[in-house]
Image: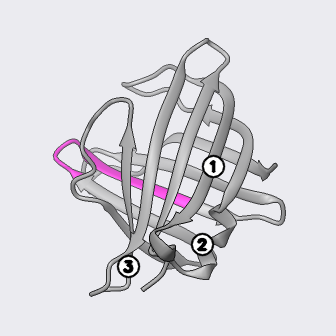
């Protein structure tokens, strides 16, 4: 089973403005995000490297590994980053109204990541909620253009 051709918009290099919302973890800030991605393991895995440099001098580094669950056909995303929390469980999701929507729940709460292809690249956003009684709150968002 290979990663869907529908995810080909993620392959290559894209960069653009990223906005981080104020939260318990970070003040509001803006910066530049550069993301590179390539199909690996005969197309079964898509590996995405994220490098963010913010106007306040801080940075973020992460690595997302996408694959398909062969039993459910759900898209899985294992997200590794400089903070070190293990990606267990992975984010799981599917296409909804033209966007790839992935969700992951841990004891710390739930995260939702949404990728949307555009004519020149893609957008993504991450939302968080501590539990199902709370509304989703924005964490970060970016508008990336292929380079």
> Is residue 115 depicted above or below 61 in this figure?
below
Disc sitting over residue 130 in the figure: none
Give residue 46's position: percent from left, percent from top.
50, 64
Give residue 61's position: percent from left, percent from top.
49, 33
Left or right: 96, with 104 as reference point: right
Left or right: 112, with 16 as reference point: left
In magenta segment, residue 99: no
> Nearer the observer, disc 1 or disc 2?
1
Mark 3 vs mark 2: which is more N-terminal?
2
| CB contact under 8 Å: marks 3 and 2 | no
Left or right: 109, with 43 as reference point: left
Task: Name the magenta segment's main secondary structure.
Answer: strand
> Is residue 7 depicted above or below 121 in this figure?
below
Per the image, the residue denoted by label 1 is 36
Disc sitting over residue 74 in the figure: 3
Please give the range of residues in magenta. 106-114
Estimate how packed mark 2 is, as few (under 14), some (14 to 19) or many (20 or more) residues with alpha carbons within 10 Å: some
Disc sitting over residue 7 in the figure: 2
Give residue 9's position: percent from left, percent from top.
68, 67
In magenta segment, residue 107: yes
Mark 1 vs mark 2: which is more N-terminal?
2
**Which is more toward the observer, 29 or 9?**
9
Distance between the alpha carbons at the discs numbered 1 and 3: 23 Å
Q: Residue at x 65, y 62 (%)?
A: 11
Distance between the alpha carbons at the discs numbered 3 and 2: 13 Å
From this viewpoint, is residue 137 visible?
no
| CB contact under 8 Å: marks 1 and 3 | no
Left or right: 132, with 42 as reference point: left
Q: Answer with the quarter of the image where residue 104 lies.
A: bottom left
Q: Residue at x 71, y 50 (%)?
A: 13
């Amino acid at each position: 089973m290979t990663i869907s051709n529908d995810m080909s918009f993620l392959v290559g290099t894209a960069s653009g403005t990223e906005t981080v919302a104020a939260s318990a973890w970070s003040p509001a800030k803006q910066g530049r995000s550069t993301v590179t991605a390539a199909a690996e393991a005969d197309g079964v895995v898509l590996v995405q490297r994220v490098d963010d440099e913010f106007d306040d001098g801080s940075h973020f580094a992460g690595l997302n590994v996408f694959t398909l669950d062969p039993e459910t056909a759900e898209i899985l995303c294992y997200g590794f980053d400089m903070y070190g929390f293990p990606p267990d469980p992975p984010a799981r999701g599917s296409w909804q109204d033209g966007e790839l929507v992935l969700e992951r729940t841990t004891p710390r709460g739930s995260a939702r990541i949404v990728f949307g292809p555009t004519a020149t690249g893609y957008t993504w956003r991450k939302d968080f909620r501590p539990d199902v009684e709370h509304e989703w709150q924005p964490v970060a968002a970016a508008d990336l253009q292929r380079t």
